[in-house]
Each structure stands twice: as C-alpha cells, then as structure tokens.
Image (cartoon, helix red, strand yellow):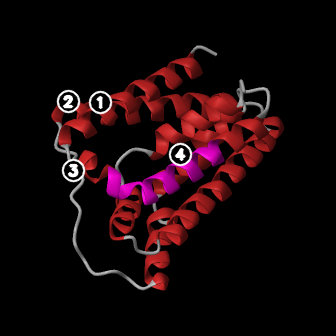
Amino acid sequence: MASFLPGFFLSLSLIVAIGAQNAFVLRQGLRRAHVFWVCLTCALSDAILIVCGVAGFGALAEAVPWFEPVMRYGGAAFLLWYGWCNARSAWQGGSALELGSEDTQPLREALLTVLALTWLNPHVYLDTVVLIGSISSQYDSRLLFGIGATLASFVFFFVLGYGARLLAPIFANARAWRILDAVIALTMWAIALKLLCL
C-alpha cells in the first residue's frame, strides 16, 4: 500500500484536471454515446504510457545515475508550475465546463477523436511517462506504484463516462471547478515538496 496508494492518487490528481480528453469523455457520457469504448480507449492509452514510464524510467535511471535527479527536479518544477496553473484557475474562476449538444458521432469517429486527444497531447507524455515514471523510482515497488496509477485511470474514466449524467450539474458550476482546481494545486505542491526534500 505504501507504493500502490501514492501511485493511485498521483495518477488521479493528474487526470481530473479539465482538459479536452476529459471534456470529450464527459460529453459522450452525457449523450450516452459509445461510453464503454471511449472510456476503455482512454484508460488503455494511459496504461500503456504509464507502463512505459515506470519500466523505462527505472531502467534508464539505473543505467545513467545523473538522469534520476535531473528528472526528479524537473518533475518538481513541472508540478510547481502545474499547481500554480490550477491555483490561478481556482482564484480566477471561469473554468466551468460548457457542454455542447452536437449529434452523436459514429463509433469509429468517436474513437479516432479520443485517440487524437490522448496521443497528440504533449502533456500526456509529461504526466504519464516522465512524471509518473520519475516519481515511481522513489518508491520500494515501482510495479505496485504503476498498478495504482493505472487503476486510477480506469476508475476515473469509467466513473466520468458513466457518472456524467449525475455529475452534469456539478461540472456546469464554476464554483465546484474552483474547489477542484484548489485541491489539485495543493496536491501537486505537496508532491513537489516531497520530491525536493528527498
């Protein structure tokens, strides 16, 4: 649990932020359109990237000793910046998700869209491969850390997709997003502090 839970909560805190991918999953859930396949595609994409980060980063850190501290401080800098962006969003507000009412896409189009939103987003590589990979090396069991991070992705996307109709009033409320952004900012800063104090 000492490795599993940090992986789970780090991954969860990284993917709950408002973004194009999450907005798309939420919209599909609200329309009840291809929810299972969209959620599964997002979660499997994250799982592939997390495995690459945890496995690849560990091997690279052992082969090149100076790489781990560089990535650790780089990861801390990214977390501080990411936390600042969320804190600023929480302070300013205006992040309520606006849901469109466009027609339902065919399954193929929906999957191509979600794949593009996932794999063409440079932040996904920073979050999963670099950040989760670098932080995993700080724990006794990188495997359990990676499993926790992967499970968080599956839980989040399926809860978001299938719970969208229940969550719609909350996600339309700018105040709720401000609270969420504040929690994400504090979480990111706490993890950055831990990295800097190692």
Sequence-wise, the earlier of marks 2 and 3 is: 2
Give the CA distance from mark 3 to mark 4: 26 Å
Residue found 36% across the figure and 54% down from its top: 19
Give the CA distance from mark 2 to mark 1: 6 Å
- Residue 87's label in the rendered image is 1
Instruction: Read off the residue under disc 2.
Output: 91
Residue 113, above or below 186 = below
Along the line of sight, which residue is nearer the eye, 36 or 65? 36
**Image quadrant in which you'd find residue 106:** bottom left
Instruction: Read off the residue under disc 4.
Output: 127
Give the CA distance from mark 4 to mark 1: 18 Å
* 3 or 4: mark nearer the eye: 3
Callout 2 secondary element: helix
Where's residue 54, x and y in %? 72, 44
Residue 138, above or below 59 = above
Along the line of sight, which residue is nearer the eye, 88 or 179? 179
Say whether residue 109 is left or right of residue 181.
right
Say if mark 2 contacts mark 1, CB within 8 Å.
yes
Q: Quadrant of the N terminus?
A: top right
Say whether residue 181 is left or right of residue 43.
left
- Residue 172's label in the rendered image is 3
Residue found 56% across the figure and 67% down from its top: 41
Where's residue 38, x and y in %? 50, 69
Amino acid at pointer 4: Asp
Residue 22 among those drawn in magenta: no
Residue found 47% across the figure and 68% down from its top: 35
Say if mark 4 contacts mark 1, CB within 8 Å.
no
Give the CA distance from mark 3 to mark 1: 19 Å
